[in-house]
Amino acid sequence: MYIGVDYYPEHWPEERWSTDARLMQEAGFNVVRLGEFDWVNMEPEDGVFTFAKWDRALAALAERGLSAILCTPTAVMPAWVAHKHPETLALQKDGTRLTWGVRKNNCFSSGTYRFLSQRITRAMAEHFADTPNVIGWQTDNEFGNPFCYCASCRADFQHWLRRKYETLDELNRAWGTHFWGHRIQSWEEITIPDDATSHNPSACLDWQRHFSWMNVRFQHEQVEILRAGCPRHFITHNFMGLFPELDYYDLAKDLDVVSWDNYPVWGAPEVRYDSSMAADLMRGLLARNFWIMEQTAGPGGWGAYGRNPRPGELRNVCYQQLAHGADAQVWFRWRTCTAGREQYWHGLLGHDGRALRRYQEAAQTAGEYRTLEKALAGTTVKADVAILYDYDSLWAVRIQPGYGGNDYTTAVRRFYRALFRAGVNVDLIPPTADFSLYKAVFAPDLCVLPDALAEHLAAYVKRGGVLLSDCRTGVKDATGLCHERTLPGLLAPVFGIEIQEYDAVPGNVTHAISGRAPIAGSFNATLSTDWVIPGTAEVLASYQDWHLQAYAAVTRNRCGDGWGYYVGTVAKEDAFYDAVVAAVLASAAVQALVTPPAGVEVSRRQGPKADLLFLINHTEEPKAVTVPAGKTELLSGKKTRRELLLERFGVAVIQL
Ligand code: GAL
Ligand code: ZN
């Protein structure tokens, strides 16, 4: 198992390197990630490469048994690149170029920048291919910025559209350019839709896809060079969890392993739902375990710093990821830098370079991971429940939310959090996934529903699957045109309902809902109501207000061997989602092994030889959990009784 830190030897005198390497080894670390911002020192002048310093740094690390992941350094262009080739700097909407500095300054279609990126990648690949402790590569750093509005990006967009649509007739149809007289008569006429609140939504959706694709292409050009030059090394990229600008499924396709950067410690301690959801998405990108490439090591911030992780909390953050399928653990960063914008972004060591509390906690965690290593081998998260996570819908909703306050990721969160509280494992999956692997699929806010996807979902339900959808499902097709159908369109037989009208509800207005078994209770609807007319569906919740009394808030329908659940509104209460999720899980015959108390997270990793139950206390109070008795808790070595006590921020790993 790889455990270590992000290390910046270029920030410290060479005399310090051996001390750092020794302290890393003493902490039980065996890997470092390096080099992502040091292009200027590897190529100080156009086409002149010097790697001697990096050879010495790698050798100092090797002496302490530390393996290295090198990065292509293209996230920060050297000043000479910007100076000599100003067209490589991204052009902003106002027509001015980004000022060189900070990082991520480049235009992704610039031929010059792509050439320079490939050249430094090739030089590094050739130089480090046989360096004994180099094991892999990270492409660039956190792809996703900046957007660029230059002539080259515009031409690139035009070419991309031409390849996608082939004919102008098809482009005009797909974008619906008969509206507002927007018919395009030659590819060169196409502009960049630079305001997603007023341009044609179909054009905006394609522009977002094109930006994503440009990043993927940029990475691909580096990957091809690394694969040819360093066939023994693996390739990864450090993703950003729920970051919304790129189609992460696409970015992952070229990689051997997905890794991601997790920074959840900010305000008051709270249940870290989003870190779990992000982990489940990161595992879903390639449908396998992932790495943590940057993990919170202390207070972070570029100006003001955030909260210092409490004793036990750094370890807790790590276990949450381990429980969700992390196979490697790398902290960001080793030592807090004394210079630059990240002076207050703290590492395991402070400015003083001493191995103190945070270092000790990381070392303790590393030691524990070693004892778990054997049990963990070959295990991953097995889930009976999936949430469909779809970037097209995410983007389409962002471009045109429909009802105010509609946000795709927030919609997914409502159901994710209820599943988390229910204590069941969840996979986040792409729309192309095989749904038959799951007993239940949640597809919230699925605005973009191409016919083929609707047919797959319907077939899944007919064969016994349980599907849940909610407000405004399937309004649009793949190019962002509204379907010419009464909702829920092709899913009507699945849900047994018809939606002739719908209503946006201001966030400060609510409509009372009353539910009956299995979702008995009183709740409040807000933001949106689909005026759901039940057909074959059973009504599980209805509205009280006079104008909504004819309509259902929640329905359930038998379809073939499966069930279709439809939630026609957004409820204010968590309890509503807990009840709906419990009903779906019951229909799908999914049962949690452990029902956690509030603030405790449960996750399970299974493999051919092991079945591990993780319990994570996200609170500052001790928590008692009812668990299977007579099993071994691997961190203490003790046998479990029915009640297991987790200390504040405590964790347990039970071998089932
Ligand atoms: C990450 C980035 C690191 C560092 C860190 C703290 O997003 O990859 O290089 O900047 O944030 O700001
Ligand atoms: Zn550009």
Image (spheres, grey):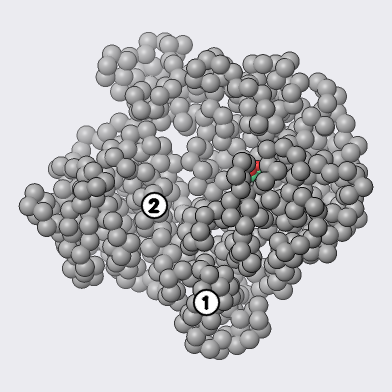
Residue 264 horizontal/vertical position (percent): 55, 54
Q: Quadrant of the C terminus?
A: bottom right
Badge 2 crowding class, 10 Å Cα cut-off, few under 14, some 14 to 19, many 20 or more, is many
Q: Residue at x 30, y 53 (%)?
A: 469
Left or right, 630 with respect to 365, comes to: left
Q: Residue at x 53, y 27 (%)?
A: 147
Up-down: is 607 above or below 294? Answer: below
Residue 102 horizontal/vertical position (percent): 66, 31
Left or right, 474 with respect to 620, comes to: left
Residue 2 horizontal/vertical position (percent): 73, 59
Element type at marker 1? loop
Residue 425 horizontal/vertical position (percent): 47, 65
Q: Which mark is residue 76?
A: none
| Rendered-image quarter of ligand 1 | top right
Q: In this figure, which residue is indicated by the disc labeled 1?
A: 622
Q: In this figure, which residue is indicated by the disc labeled 2?
A: 412
For marks 1 and 2, the one nearer the N-term is: 2
Q: Quadrant of residue 112?
A: top right
Q: Residue at x 83, y 26 (%)?
A: 44
Residue 318 visible to the viewer: no
Q: Quadrant of residue 295?
A: bottom right
